[in-house]
Amino acid sequence: MKIAPLFSEKTVFSFEVFPPKKTSPIETVYQTLEELQDLHPDFISVTLGAGGSGNGENTIAIARRLQEQYGITSMSHLPCIHCTKEKIDALLETFLESGIENILALRGDRVPELEPEHDFAHASDLITYIRETHPNFDIAGACYPECHTEATSLEEDIANLKKKVDAGATHLISQLFFDNEAFFHFQAEARKAGITVPIEAGIMPVTNSKQITRMVSMCGASLPRKFTRIIQKYEDNPTALQDAGIAYAIAQIIELLAAGVDGIHLYTMNNPYVARKISEAISGVLRATQR
């Protein structure tokens, strides 16, 4: 099932999972899927190797299992900076053979030990190419509420985002953020720029202090004072920090839902306990906001 039409029917609630590390068997993620299935997300996205450097075998296997065994619509990430057109073609054909209709088109992170290919410099190039060669895919794009780390300004970043939408992205999923006001400002500026497609808010529950340091260094998300106060207070108490991180994410989501957000995309970090706690806490609010 294609994801884009869902946004006209409801407030979408979705998850992200990732394949296990190369040193772990793929079965380690299947237990996570078992525990996520009865939470009934509208779809689950599955990440692929940084920059598209992997062959996507585990990503495709997980996405296929989600649909065939659990009846959950899947979306495969597709980064392109380290991909040739031939590799993209091969992946797209494999997606089709596996019944995967939904793609999150990404430039992807640069892999230091690999030279970038020259076929796709930006995600908008990939979206254009997919629309021209495989038009039946539903293509989502990524967006950055606090500006992509390589953009010189939010205005420049939104102009680039508009290129993705004009190229054929039917909806957008945001990078993680911890300040809802930053998201609301970004959303308003995107609408002013003529971006009318649905925008899902990406929420990551922080359950350990190392996690937040790593993620903020990668994506540049700002940390509100009320958030850093939680981290500083409970960083030496893992149980308390997990509970506090879940509570913060719940509060974020409830405010976003009250403001009429198009959807919530929960970065589960393959932690079904956290996903369940949040899903159960927001279930009544989510039902109350349905169109």
Image (cartoon, rainbow, N blue to C red):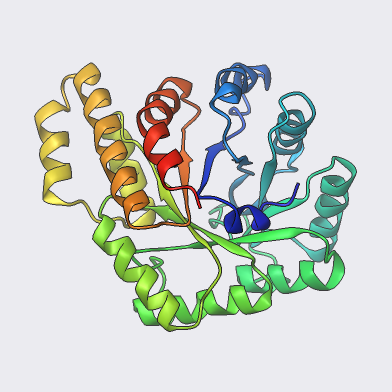
Eyeballing the image, is 258 above or below 46? below
Give whichever of 43, 211 is nearer the camera. 43
Asked whether, in this view, residue 269 is left or right of residue 210, the answer is: right
Give whichever of 183, 7 is nearer the camera. 7
Give whichever of 254, 169 is nearer the camera. 254
Q: From where the camera sits, is residue 118 visible?
A: no
Asked whether, in this view, residue 54 is left or right of residue 197, the answer is: right
Name the residue at 63% across, 52% down: 6
Counting the numbered discs, the total is: 0
Where does residue 140 sit, x and y in percent of width and height?
A: 62, 60
Q: From where the camera sits, is residue 149 visible?
A: yes
Name the residue at 30% across, 70% down: 185
Where does residue 255 sit, x and y in percent of width and height?
A: 28, 49
In terms of image quadrants, where is residue 287? top left
Eyeballing the image, is 285 above or below 113? above
In terms of image quadrants, where is residue 137? bottom right
Name the residue at 56% across, 53% down: 111
Where does residue 106 sit, x and y in percent of width and height?
A: 60, 60
Where does residue 182 sit, x and y in percent of width and height?
A: 28, 63
In terms of image quadrants, where is residue 152? bottom left
Eyeballing the image, is 209 above or below 193? above
Asked whether, in this view, residue 57 is left or right of residue 106, the answer is: right
Asked whether, in this view, residue 290 is left or right of residue 78, the answer is: left
